Amino acid sequence: MRSQEPFNAEPPLDALSRSFVTPTGSFFVRSHGDVPVIDGQDWHLTVSGTGITPLRLSLAELRERFPRRSVVATIQCAGNRRAELSTVSPTLGLQWDAGAIGTAEWTGASLGDVLRAAGLGEADGLHVAFTCHDVLDHKGERVAFGVSIPARKALSPEVLLAYEMNGAELAPEHGFPVRAVVPGYAGVRSPKWLRSIEVRARPSDNPMQQLDYKLFPREIREDTADWSRGAAIDELPLNAAICDPAPGAVVPAGRVRARGYAVASGRAIARVELSCDGGRTWIEADLAARPDTPWAWTPWSADLDLRAGQHELAVRAWDSAGQTQPAEAAEVWNFKGYCCAAWHRVRVQAR
Ligand SMILES: Nc1nc2c(c(=O)[nH]1)N[C@H]1C(S)=C(S)[C@@H](COP(=O)(O)O)O[C@H]1N2
Ligand SMILES: [Mo]
């Protein structure tokens, strides 16, 4: 539990690494306000804006008018692993461990199908803005949650208006009755409890888009940040974490099986490496990617040989473009604590 009101929670990491698809009950929850109570019978989605003939869809119409599509996709909060950045210097926000991530089978209508049915043709330079049913406090004002994505991404086949998660209707805390699922983008771009969609020339004016979820250089602090100059976080950096053993674990000396995940925004994970000596030497992990989905994480496992004593385990991934991760959290520190993709390090004791 990272906060009770609003409700925010992540699973223990060993539970997270036990299955490819995360059971819904173990899937992290990140909500900025109260979970809205919505009657699926009354719910409607409106679609409007530039190049659109306005549409108003009930849940039944969304299910019946558009082909049903499923995508197995990982959703990760941009603040995943924030707690590690805070060991360098304090950061703002929920202090997530490496569990603000999960993989589900999402089923719904393709957002592109809905936008094309509403008349959208050319996407160049346009943005698709979402407004939701949950209301948050912004500087003393009550504001509905809202974010946007580039229309080019919105028309990509992997982007869904999802009404099911892991074969069941969405749970209230995961966006019932309909949420967007934008694979490869930070979790914040997958809005829950959808109310309306607007196609527009500029990104959403919502404070969630303009004054949050932006990446700043390490020199910038809260009081010096010019939010118009921050980079909106859409795609996330290449990342990997050790889920088992846990930090501080005492393990029997000898063969120890380590497990975890690696994730890249739509690129393939080419290799995952483990170190038992803080990064001086590395061995290669076994990968368990699912070839049918480029939008899901790659679970990995590796057999380590640990002599009795203290060890600093570290993991790093390489993607199909030959990129790898920075060694130190200090290199990527930012005051909001986003995009922590440094080598994940876990100290264990073998005896
Ligand atoms: N309407 C709405 N959508 C939202 C949020 C929210 O607070 N309100 N949180 C976002 C963030 S920051 C993340 S990381 C994901 C988390 O999705 P989950 O709670 O289903 O894991 O939802 C996103 N969608
Ligand atoms: Mo998030």
Image: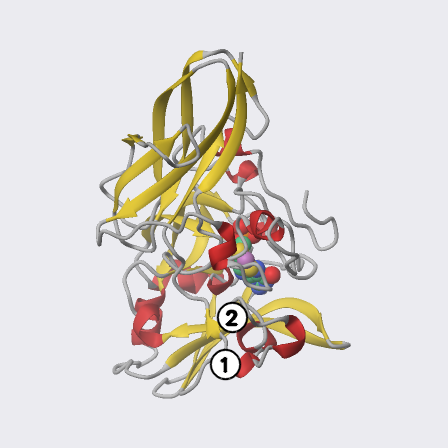
Q: Quadrant of the N terminus?
A: top right
Q: Quadrant of residue 289?
A: top left
Camera-side residue of 336 and 152: 336
Q: Which residue is pictured at 59% across the width and 76% down the height?
A: 211
Residue 142 location, quadrant: bottom right
- In this orientation, which residue lies closer to the viewer: 10 or 316? 316
* Measured Cα–Cα span from mark 2 to mark 1: 8 Å
Label 2 environment density (alpha carbons within 10 Å; few <14, some 14–19, many ≥20): many
Q: Residue at x 31, y 58 (%)?
A: 158
Name the residue that disc number 2 marks: 216
Q: Position of residue 306 (x, y in %)?
A: 43, 17
Q: Which residue is mark 1?
A: 229
**Which of disc 1 and disc 2 is earlier in sequence?**
2
User: Which residue is nearer to you in this view: 151 or 106?
Assistant: 151
- Badge 2 element: loop
**Residue 63 image offset from top left, x and y in percent:** 40, 58
